[in-house]
Image: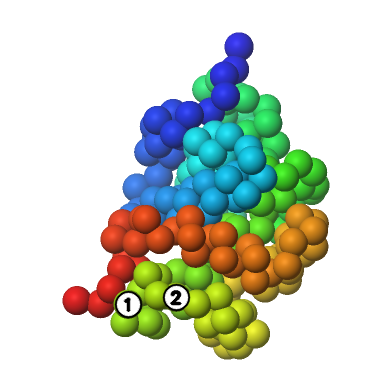
Amino acid sequence: MSEKLTMDRAEELLASTTTEDHLFQHALAVSACMGAMARHFGADESYWRAVGYLHDYDFEQFPQEHLKHTAEPLREAGVDEESIHAILAHGYGLCTDTVPESELDKSLYTVDELSGLISATARMHPAGIAELQVSSVKKKFKDKRFAAKIDRAVIQDGCARLGMELPDVIALCIEGMRPFAAELGIGPRQ
Ligand SMILES: [Fe+2]
């Protein structure tokens, strides 16, 4: 029987496949954004945070086959199907054909790339994310040369699927990431 994923279990599972600091940092950033999205939807915050934390489970070991080595090992580890579906759907159109269906799926699909853009923008500001404005992130969203690897089309598609405006999702993610500024390396400049 699988149980609803917990943060402790997500941390344990990610640590079994992952060693690189920046990947743990990315996991935490996505997890923090998912917490804010859960609050917005009145969903289970700790559950959404756990799913966010685990979403890149196989990425370090299989960067060229991302999400191809996820469903089976997670199922064997007792992870619930709802989590597995959301994790597979975050790569929709990029490395899977699992369509984001639920609010959980769509949120993860959207904040994965968006959290990276917010972190990169926060690093440009002396106060870090503490005083980061939604408008600054929007400007960087439009500047395609800034953090060029971040796929703006996915973020836009995600917002459309959520039925939300980009600035509202940015605001939620900033709010979600703020308490983790130090761990995310986006606190005030020393
Ligand atoms: Fe990711």
Where residue 125 sits in the image (x, y, percent)?
37, 82
Colouring scheme applied when the structure was drawn: rainbow
The structure residue drawn at horizontal position 76% and vertical position 55%, both measured from the top left corner, is: 162
The numbered mark at residue 154 is none
Task: Report whether 190 appears left or right of 101.
Answer: left
* Disc 2 residue crowd, few under 14, some 14–19, many 20+, Cα 10 Å: many
- Residue 29 picture quarter: bottom left
User: Which residue carries the number 2 mark?
Assistant: 132
User: Which residue carries the number 1 mark?
Assistant: 127
Q: Which of 109/19 is in front? A: 109
Where residue 23 sits in the image (x, y, percent)?
42, 54
Q: Residue furthest left?
A: 190
The structure residue drawn at horizontal position 70% and vertical position 37%, both measured from the top left corner, is: 85
Q: Quadrant of the C terminus?
A: bottom left
Where residue 47 sits in the image (x, y, percent)?
54, 34
Q: Are marks 1 and 2 in contact (CB under 8 Å)?
A: yes
- N-terminal label among 1 and 2: 1
Q: Residue furthest top?
A: 1
Judged from the image, the secondary structure of the residue bearing numbered disc 2 is loop
